[in-house]
Image (tube, helix red, strand yellow):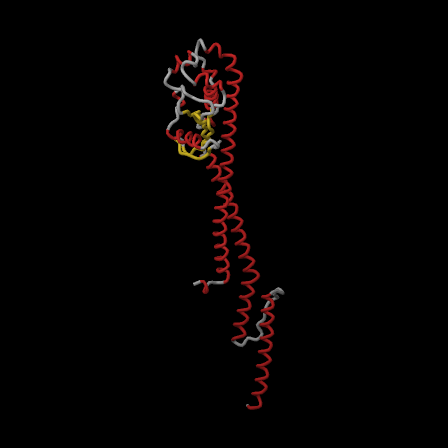
């Protein structure tokens, strides 16, 4: 079927094939690039929040706790607990900033004093990975949540300070107010150097992914418009510089074939088409000369 097509149709089909193939390759490449860029954006956002929460924990541990530790022996003061402070600050951030409403922060623990921090099944898997691989310092991945796709970043919670064991070694060594508040069954038996949980921040990825998809659509639309413009331009140049001159040559050839030796070409460019026309013109002159000779030879016989 292809051999029966016109020259312009063949070139258009070839260019459209190149367009489709090119757009497919570009779409795949841009998809990988935008996905990587999106993950970097989400990771940066999650790391900023993670470092902020770590700063709150450090401030509570080094500044607040020393000032209130003696008072905590009389009454329970959750404000001296780093995990409590970080969680409260994050909840305030979510409450006052609607854009962070779908963000989540948790210090998931296998054996917490406050049962609100107990790790669920998903979080237990993360913690077990940290326990089995002590050199593993961070886990990042995507997971499904109630609000859609979530990107999470997790870091191990490891007991590195003796001060942490004041409340979590044994019930006898813990402040009475802590034992009175949480009882003696949970949150004890921790040891120095032990990984007891994971600090996890979940960031909604749907919005960022949607922006990446929109960017991909815009980029592909621009590239498609450029390709289509090139195809139209090539078609115009092909028609003006190749197809029309060839049609003129065919027309003159048909005139000559029926004996009209006066048919001639318009002025053509000095390119390959012009060379073809010039060769045909010389052939026409040679044909005219040959016919004149035949005419002179045949005249005496009559």
Q: Position of residue 271 (x, y in %)?
A: 61, 64
* Front residue (pair 68, 284): 68
Q: Name the residue at 56% across, 65% down.
A: 245
Q: Position of residue 155 (x, y in %)?
A: 47, 29
* Front residue (pair 301, 81): 81
The residue sitting at the bottom extreme is 301
User: Which quadrant would the N terminus be assigned to in this image?
Assistant: bottom left
| Quarter of the rendering containing residue 171 | top left
Q: How many labels, in total?
A: 0
Q: Is residue 259 left or right of residue 194?
A: right
Q: Position of residue 60 (x, y in %)?
A: 51, 18
Q: Is residue 245 left or right of residue 185?
A: right
Q: Name the residue at 52% across, 26% down.
A: 51
Image: 168 above or below 74: below
| Quarter of the rendering containing residue 246 | bottom right
The residue sitting at the right extreme is 270
Q: Name the residue at 55% across, 91% down.
A: 301
* Front residue (pair 251, 212): 212
User: Which quadrant would the C terminus be assigned to in this image?
Assistant: bottom right
Q: Position of residue 134 (x, y in %)?
A: 46, 31
Image: 80 above or below 22: above
């Amino acid at each position: 079927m292809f051999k029966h097509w016109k020259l312009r149709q063949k070139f258009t089909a070839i260019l459209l094939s190149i367009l489709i193939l090119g757009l497919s390759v570009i779409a795949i490449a841009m998809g990988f690039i935008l996905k990587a860029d999106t993950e970097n954006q989400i990771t940066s956002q999650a790391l900023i929040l993670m470092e902020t929460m770590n700063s709150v924990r450090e401030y509570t541990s080094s500044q607040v706790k020393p000032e209130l530790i003696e008072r905590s022996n009389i009454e329970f003061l959750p404000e001296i607990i780093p995990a409590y402070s970080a969680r409260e600050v994050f909840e305030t951030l979510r409450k006052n900033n609607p854009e962070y409403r779908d963000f989540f922060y948790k210090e998931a623990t296998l054996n917490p004093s406050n049962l609100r921090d107990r790790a669920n099944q998903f979080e237990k898997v993360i913690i077990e990975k940290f326990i089995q691989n002590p050199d593993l310092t961070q886990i990042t991945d995507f997971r499904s949540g109630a609000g859609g796709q979530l990107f999470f970043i997790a870091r191990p919670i490891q007991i590195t300070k003796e001060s942490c064991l004041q409340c979590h070694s044994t019930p006898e060594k813990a402040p009475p107010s802590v034992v009175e508040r949480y009882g003696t069954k949970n949150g004890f038996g921790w040891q120095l150097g032990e990984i007891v949980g994971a600090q996890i921040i979940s960031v909604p990825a749907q919005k960022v992914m949607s922006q990446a998809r929109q960017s991909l659509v815009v980029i592909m639309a621009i590239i498609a418009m450029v390709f289509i413009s090139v195809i139209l331009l090539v078609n115009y140049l092909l028609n003006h510089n190749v197809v029309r001159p060839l049609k003129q040559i065919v027309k003159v050839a048909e005139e000559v074939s029926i004996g009209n030796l006066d048919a001639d070409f318009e002025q053509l460019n000095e390119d390959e088409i012009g060379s073809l026309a010039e060769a045909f013109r010389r052939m026409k002159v040679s044909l005219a000369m040959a016919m004149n000779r035949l005419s002179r030879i045949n005249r005496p016989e009559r």
